[in-house]
Each structure stands twice: as C-alpha cells, then as structure tokens.
Image (cartoon, rainbow, N blue to C red):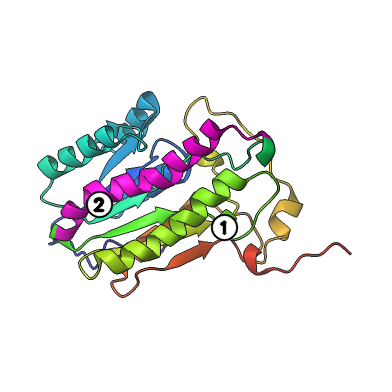
Amino acid sequence: MGLWGPKTMTQSDVRYTAVVTGAARGIGRCVATTLARHGYEVMFVDRDGPAVRQAAAEADAPHRVADVGEESGVAAVMEDVGLRWDGLDLLVNNAAIADPFNAPLEDLPWADWQKRLQTNLSGAMLCSKHALPLLRRRRGSIVNMASTRALQSEPHSEAYAASKAGLVGFTHALAVSAGPQVRVNAVSPGWIDTGDWRAEGDPVGEPLADSDHVQHPAGRVGRPEDVAEAVLYLAGSGFVTGANLVVDGGMTRRMIYEE
C-alpha cells in the first residue's frame, strides 16, 4: 500500500471513523479492511449477515446488517454510528448489485430496472442523507463507488450503466450542496479482479489469461487494493471534491477498433 492515510493523522491524534457499505466481499471488504489498517475505526455494513460478520470479525471491527435500499435500515445504521462515535469522517457508498448485465431492454422487467437503481443509486442517496449530520460534525467526506460503465458500455447493461452514471452526477451535485463542510467524490473502477476478497462460498470465475492483462495500458487487470488506494487518497485530500477518479489501468483512454 502507498502512503495515503486518514487525513493527516499522527499517532497522538484521535482515531478517524468510517462506514463502508457492501463490506462483506470484494472491493468493499478490501476498502474497509484497508481503512482499518490505516487507523480508521470502521463499521462494516452489508445485507449479507454471515459474510459481513466474518469480514468485520477478521478486522476486529463493528458491523451492521442492512439493505441500503431500505431507508429505515439505513437510518438505524447511522443512528448507531451517532451513538458509537461523536461524528463520521468518511462514508464509502460501495454497496451495489454488481452484475452489469440485464435482459434486452424490450424484455427488461420494470422490477429489475427499479431494483438496480434502488440499490446502486438510491442506496447511496439514503446513506448520504442520513450520514450528512454526522459528517458535518467532523468535516468529513463521502466516496461513491461508481464504475467505468458510467462512461462506456457493452450490450444489455442499461440498468447498471444508468445507476452508475447517475451516481457520478449525484456526486458532483452533492459536492456543491454539501460543501464546504463535506467533500463528495467518486471512484470509477474498471476491471478489478476480486478473487482474494471473495466471501466464503462465492463462486470462482475463470482464471485470468495473459491477454486480459496485456490489453490494459497499465499492463495488468486491477486489484481491490488499487481501489482502496484511491479511496484513501480522496479521504485525505482536502482540496478535491466533486471529482470522479477513474481507476481502470488506462482502458477508457485506449482507442480500440477491429482491424
């Protein structure tokens, strides 16, 4: 890991606090664990109770079981945070339905569209809404986990792309509304191999091929640690707000045409 840490914390300072949603597995688990290792007190939040309990226990951290798409559950989490700590330094809105593909649009059930947006976009809104009073106490920040699919697409990914593009727009709008007390930024990961951060029992995908790595200008597929580094940077950089930091090994900058 790099040198980015929580704001400018020294050994004599109070510990900083963070809430990470979708913290039971994958990028969210890595971000939460990395923050804890860098001195944050972290609350792991996920709707998968057994998985989030295990992830939090391994980091010796508190956890809450909640669906970010349900306002009552989100409000209860933030009430617990307020009772546990005197404020909040960082909210990472990572929880999402990760599968980017849906049926062809003419066959896409309305309920499936709504479910993606409810979790991926409205969930970030609800968490931010109920966390803002806590964040203002500590002049904290929010990091929203968007995606390069907000910028480029494959067929039949409309619901996911719309939710992530909406999250980028939500980020810069809230940055203007919540500033200067609270900064708001986004990270847009590209292809991230979450193999080492799966929850127990998660399916194992196909192994990566050399061609998967070499197509990236950076020379490799991303790792969850790359995203955690970006979150740490945004949490500690007091002059950055409203930004969308693309972490994709350069793929969105590469021009690709069939020869």
- What is the x, y in percent for residue 24? 40, 35
- What is the x, y in percent for residue 178? 25, 64
**Is any atom of residue 104 visible in this view?**
no
- Check if residue 110 falls in the magenta segment: yes
**Is any atom of residue 253 visible in this view?**
yes
Q: Quadrant of residue 203?
A: top right
Q: Quadrant of the C terminus?
A: bottom right
- Check if residue 6 falls in the magenta segment: no
Determine the main secondary structure of the stretch shown in magenta. Answer: helix
Quick one: SS at disc 2? strand
Left or right: residue 87 versus residue 102 is left
- What is the x, y in percent for residue 107? 67, 34
Q: Quadrant of the N terminus?
A: bottom left
Residues at discs 1 and 2 in contact (Cβ within 8 Å): no
- What is the x, y in percent for residue 171? 39, 61
**Which is nearer the eye, 9 or 75?**
75
Left or right: residue 109 versus residue 187 is right
Reading the image, the residue beneath label 1 is: 148
Left or right: residue 23 versus residue 84 is right
Reading the image, the residue beneath label 2 is: 40
**Which residue is depicted at the point 81% across and 65% down?**
257
In the image, which is nearer the foreground, mark 1 or mark 2? Answer: 1
**Which residue is depicted at the point 17% across and 59% down?**
136
- CA–CA distance in space, label 1 to label 2: 28 Å
**Which residue is depicted at the point 36% across and 64% down?**
173
Q: Give the total number of marks visible in the rendering.
A: 2
Q: Which residues are magenta?
A: 107-136
Amino acid at circle 2: Tyr
**Which is nearer the eye, 164 or 18?**
164
